[in-house]
Image: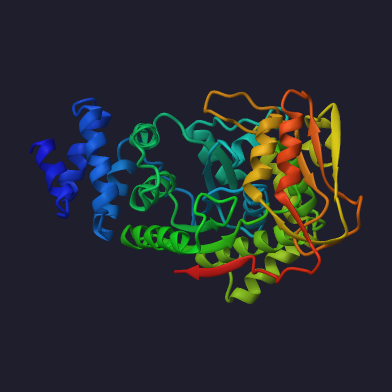
Amino acid sequence: MRTVDIIRKKRDGGELSREELAHVIEGYTKKQVPDYQVSSFLMAVYFAGLSETEVADLTDVIMRSGVVVDLSAIPGVKVDKHSTGGVGDKTSLIVAPVVAAAGVHVPMISGRGLGHTGGTLDKLESIPGFNTRLTTEQFREGLSSVGAALVGQTDELAPADRALYALRDATGTVESIPLIAASIMSKKMVEGIDALVLDVKTGSGAFMKKQTDARRLAQAMVSIGRRMNKRVLALITDMDQPLGNAVGNSLEVMEAINTLRNQGPPDLTELSVELSARMLMLADSAKSYDQAREQCTTLLENGQALEKFKQLVANQGGDAGVVDAFEKLPTSSAEYTVASPRGGFVSRIQAEDIGTAAMLLGAGRETVDSKIDHGVGIVLERKVGERVESGDTLCTLYYNSDEHLEEATQMVEDSFRIAAAAPEAKPLIYEIIQ
């Protein structure tokens, strides 16, 4: 089997077998197939696409390029949640303890933020002592004792995905939906899960700006899950404005904790309950959708979800005292408020600009090697649809260095639109793919 023949076959629209896909991916991982040939292969896929069978086979090959976690010794359905990324999206910090408090095991391998989108690992690591680098055995122990474990991807898990992503970034093939789907699902399937709820973002702050593209990605990932005998459901949700009010690592941890106290922003609470309920349904832990939602709401109201969060933090070496003492979290030394230039209604908040401004303040990474400041970020005081008077605070910027303050402030000011009339309300959840 020759790599060049596989490239030609895909270039000309042919369907590749699992063996042919494995030849390219395994060969590249073992440094037997050169990067210039894999680059050509990726570009052929970008233009010719992949069938549902090919995407499922590619996902399986990438997943099996390293260790696949075995959670069979842990009873019950293991279910995870994955978001395609956005601004202010801290639902993982809420969903994992809620679902674990309901008695369902939640193994969650998360990522770091890059560019305008935040990362779950960065948020968790703003908690003093929190360890996201657990061994596989520690990961299993956390699932058994607490019911949830939130960790980062190790070198042993789907190494082919990391190698391919770096090459996709350098060859202009990142936007390929089949390649995106295989990348995401390979990292999720390697966890040893039985079920998965996907939160596919669409809008100005999402990777998929158009709802049609978000739908195509959701359908591709649900198809992969079905072909791999997993229970998978996808929600397409709004990311035209930030989710919740806080953007920035420790600020988002505070907001997540407040949401676990049932005192969070309405949109963040609504989406967290929805995702949690869907996870319970996939795990056969509720007889109906309405019962699942009621159970999740009750766990927020009675404090059990917050208690589970404390257990999760303590089990992974973190200071659970942050729940009752936010001053234990990293903070900023200065703040700057942005006021509304006129009265009216907030008609738009450009989510990507808010995320980029937070990155400029130090809350995110411009490159994978950038260091982040866990204590800085932005808190929105107004959301789309709310009425404001001239001079009302729209948001507050929290910072430790004023090096990029002027640029970030200008970006934030430009991200808000004030109109004479209230905008038409948009749904938080556009559709469900299953």
Q: Quadrant of the C terminus?
A: bottom left
Q: Is residue 409 above or below residue 282?
A: above
Judge from the rendering whether residue 224 lies leftward or rightward of residue 245; answer left or right: left
Q: Quadrant of residue 247?
A: top right
Q: Is residue 116 above or below residue 49?
A: above
Q: x, y percentage for residue 249?
A: 70, 37
Q: Nearer the viewer, residue 358 or 417?
A: 417
Residue drawn at 75 percent across, 65 percent down: 298
Q: Quadrant of the N terminus?
A: top left
Q: x, y percentage for residue 199?
A: 54, 57
Q: Is residue 211 above or below residue 352?
A: below
Residue 315 appears in the figure: no
Q: Nearer the viewer, residue 61 or 283?
A: 61
Residue drawn at 85 percent across, 50 percent down: 341
Q: Nearer the viewer, residue 121 or 304?
A: 121
Residue drawn at 15 percent across, 44 percent down: 20
Q: x, y percentage for residue 34?
A: 21, 27
Q: Quadrant of residue 102?
A: bottom right
Q: Nearer the viewer, residue 171 or 133?
A: 171
Residue 195 appears in the figure: yes
Q: x, y percentage for residue 389?
A: 91, 58
Judge from the rendering whether residue 28 lies leftward or rightward of residue 305; answer left or right: left
